[in-house]
Structures are given as structure tokens and as C-alpha cells.
Image (cartoon, rainbow, N blue to C red):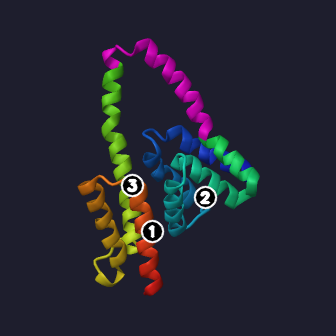
């Protein structure tokens, strides 16, 4: 029963993850944290961090991680298959449609209409992760004692380095992890 539940949950994520990995984060959170309670919000934030750092799409990495945590190796396989099956079907159909009708104005209008929605989904996911990273699982607070100043400093430092010097994000992730680890060990 749990394998079927894992498959269906990640099938839904795969089916509605329009816009790529970052757009899938709210869907993953809804299934994994809110509906099925497989992970806490803090564990989910760690999951997204790990899924972002490891090679491969966030949704597939998340499916594999959650599946193995909930039902072992079979859970990982079932969750991952559930996540990728909708994409395989949809991309095959869309590729055929796109190449057949790519010059139609209606198709171009639909694609233009989807762009702002995808940006909103990515921004929503980023804001959720930002709040947990800076204030913890309690969420946003005006109390300065709940603010994690180390995380806030790392956040703004990473943005500065990425925008100013166009540094490779991998180096920013590694550097932030090392600096954050050292600071937390010394604190």
C-alpha cells in the first residue's frame, strides 16, 4: 500500500511540475510534508538542499530520497518511476505537437501565458525555503531573537558573489557550506 501511495504522490508531482525543478518544490512540499507527513518542514528543507547539490533534477532526487526513507530501495524505485513517467509521456506528446504546430500563434500565446506562472511558482518555493533558512520552522517573525544571522549573512553574501562576479554556483554552494560549517562548529 505504501508503495502505491509513494508512486501516486510522485506521479502527481511529475504530472504537475510544469517549469522545472524549482517549480516542483511547492508540489513536493505539499505531498511530502503537508499531506503524507513523511518529512517535517526542516527535513524537507534539508532534502531540497541535498537534492539541489546532487546531480540530477530536484524532483527525481527528492523522489528517490523520500522513497528510500519510507520504503527502502523498492520505495526509491517506485517513487522515482512515479516521478518520471508523466514526463516521459507528456514530453513525447508535446514534442510531436510542437514540431507539428510550432508556427501557430495560439501555441506561442499559450507558452507566453505559462511563463509568469512558472516564475511565481519558483518565487513561492524560494520564499518558503528562505523563511525556514532564516527563521527556522516557526516561520517568519518580527522578533530579532528568532533570526539566524549566520544564515542571513550567508544568503546575502551568496547573492552578492553570484551577481557581482558571476561565480560558478557550485563554488558558492561549497564555499557557503564550508563557511557555515566552520561558523557553527566554532559557535
Neighbourhood count class around disc 3 (C-alpha, 10 Å): few under 14, some 14–19, many 20 upward: few
Whether residue 58 is visible, yes or no, is yes
| CA separation in Å, label 1 and label 2 | 30 Å
Single out the mark in the foreground, 3 or 2.
Answer: 3
Residues in magenta, as a range? 84-106
**Residue 2 relative to residue 50: left or right:** right
Q: Is residue 184 magenta?
A: no
Neighbourhood count class around disc 1 (C-alpha, 10 Å): few under 14, some 14–19, many 20 upward: few
**Residue 167 relative to residue 64: left or right:** left
| Residue designated by label 2 | 36
Q: Is residue 174 above or below residue 11?
A: below
Q: Report the magenta stretch's main SS.
A: helix
Rendering coords of residue 57 (x, y %): 52, 46
Camera-side residue of 172 and 120: 172
Rendering coords of residue 141 (x, y %): 32, 75
Circle 3: element type = helix
| Residue designated by label 3 | 169
- Which quadrant of the rendered structure holds the C terminus? bottom left
Circle 1: element type = helix
Q: Give whichever of discs 1 and 2 has the lower sequence position.
A: 2
Circle 2: element type = loop
The residue positioned 38% from the left and 16% from the top of the image is: 102
| CA separation in Å, label 3 and label 2 | 32 Å
| Residue designated by label 1 | 177
The residue positioned 54% from the left and 38% from the top of the image is: 15
**Residue 61 relative to residue 118: left or right:** right
Amino acid at each position: 500500500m505504501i508503495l502505491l501511495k509513494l508512486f501516486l504522490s510522485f506521479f502527481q508531482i511529475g504530472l504537475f511540475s510544469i517549469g522545472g525543478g524549482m517549480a516542483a518544490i511547492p508540489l513536493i512540499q505539499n505531498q511530502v510534508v503537508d499531506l503524507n507527513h513523511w518529512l517535517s518542514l526542516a527535513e524537507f528543507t534539508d532534502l531540497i538542499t541535498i537534492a539541489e547539490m546532487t546531480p540530477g533534477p530536484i524532483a527525481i532526487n527528492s523522489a528517490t530520497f523520500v522513497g528510500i526513507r519510507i520504503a527502502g530501495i523498492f520505495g526509491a524505485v517506485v517513487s522515482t518511476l512515479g516521478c518520471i513517467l508523466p514526463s516521459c509521456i507528456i514530453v513525447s506528446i508535446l514534442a510531436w505537437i510542437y514540431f507539428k504546430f510550432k508556427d501557430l500563434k495560439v501555441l506561442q500565446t499559450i507558452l507566453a501565458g505559462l511563463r509568469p506562472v512558472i516564475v511565481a511558482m519558483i518565487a513561492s518555493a524560494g520564499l518558503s525555503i528562505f523563511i525556514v533558512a532564516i527563521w527556522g520552522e516557526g516561520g517568519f517573525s518580527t522578533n530579532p531573537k528568532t533570526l539566524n544571522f549566520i544564515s542571513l549573512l550567508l544568503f546575502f553574501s551568496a547573492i552578492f558573489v553570484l551577481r557581482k562576479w558571476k561565480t560558478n554556483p557550485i563554488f558558492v554552494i561549497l564555499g557557503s557550506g564550508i563557511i557555515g560549517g566552520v561558523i557553527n562548529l566554532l559557535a
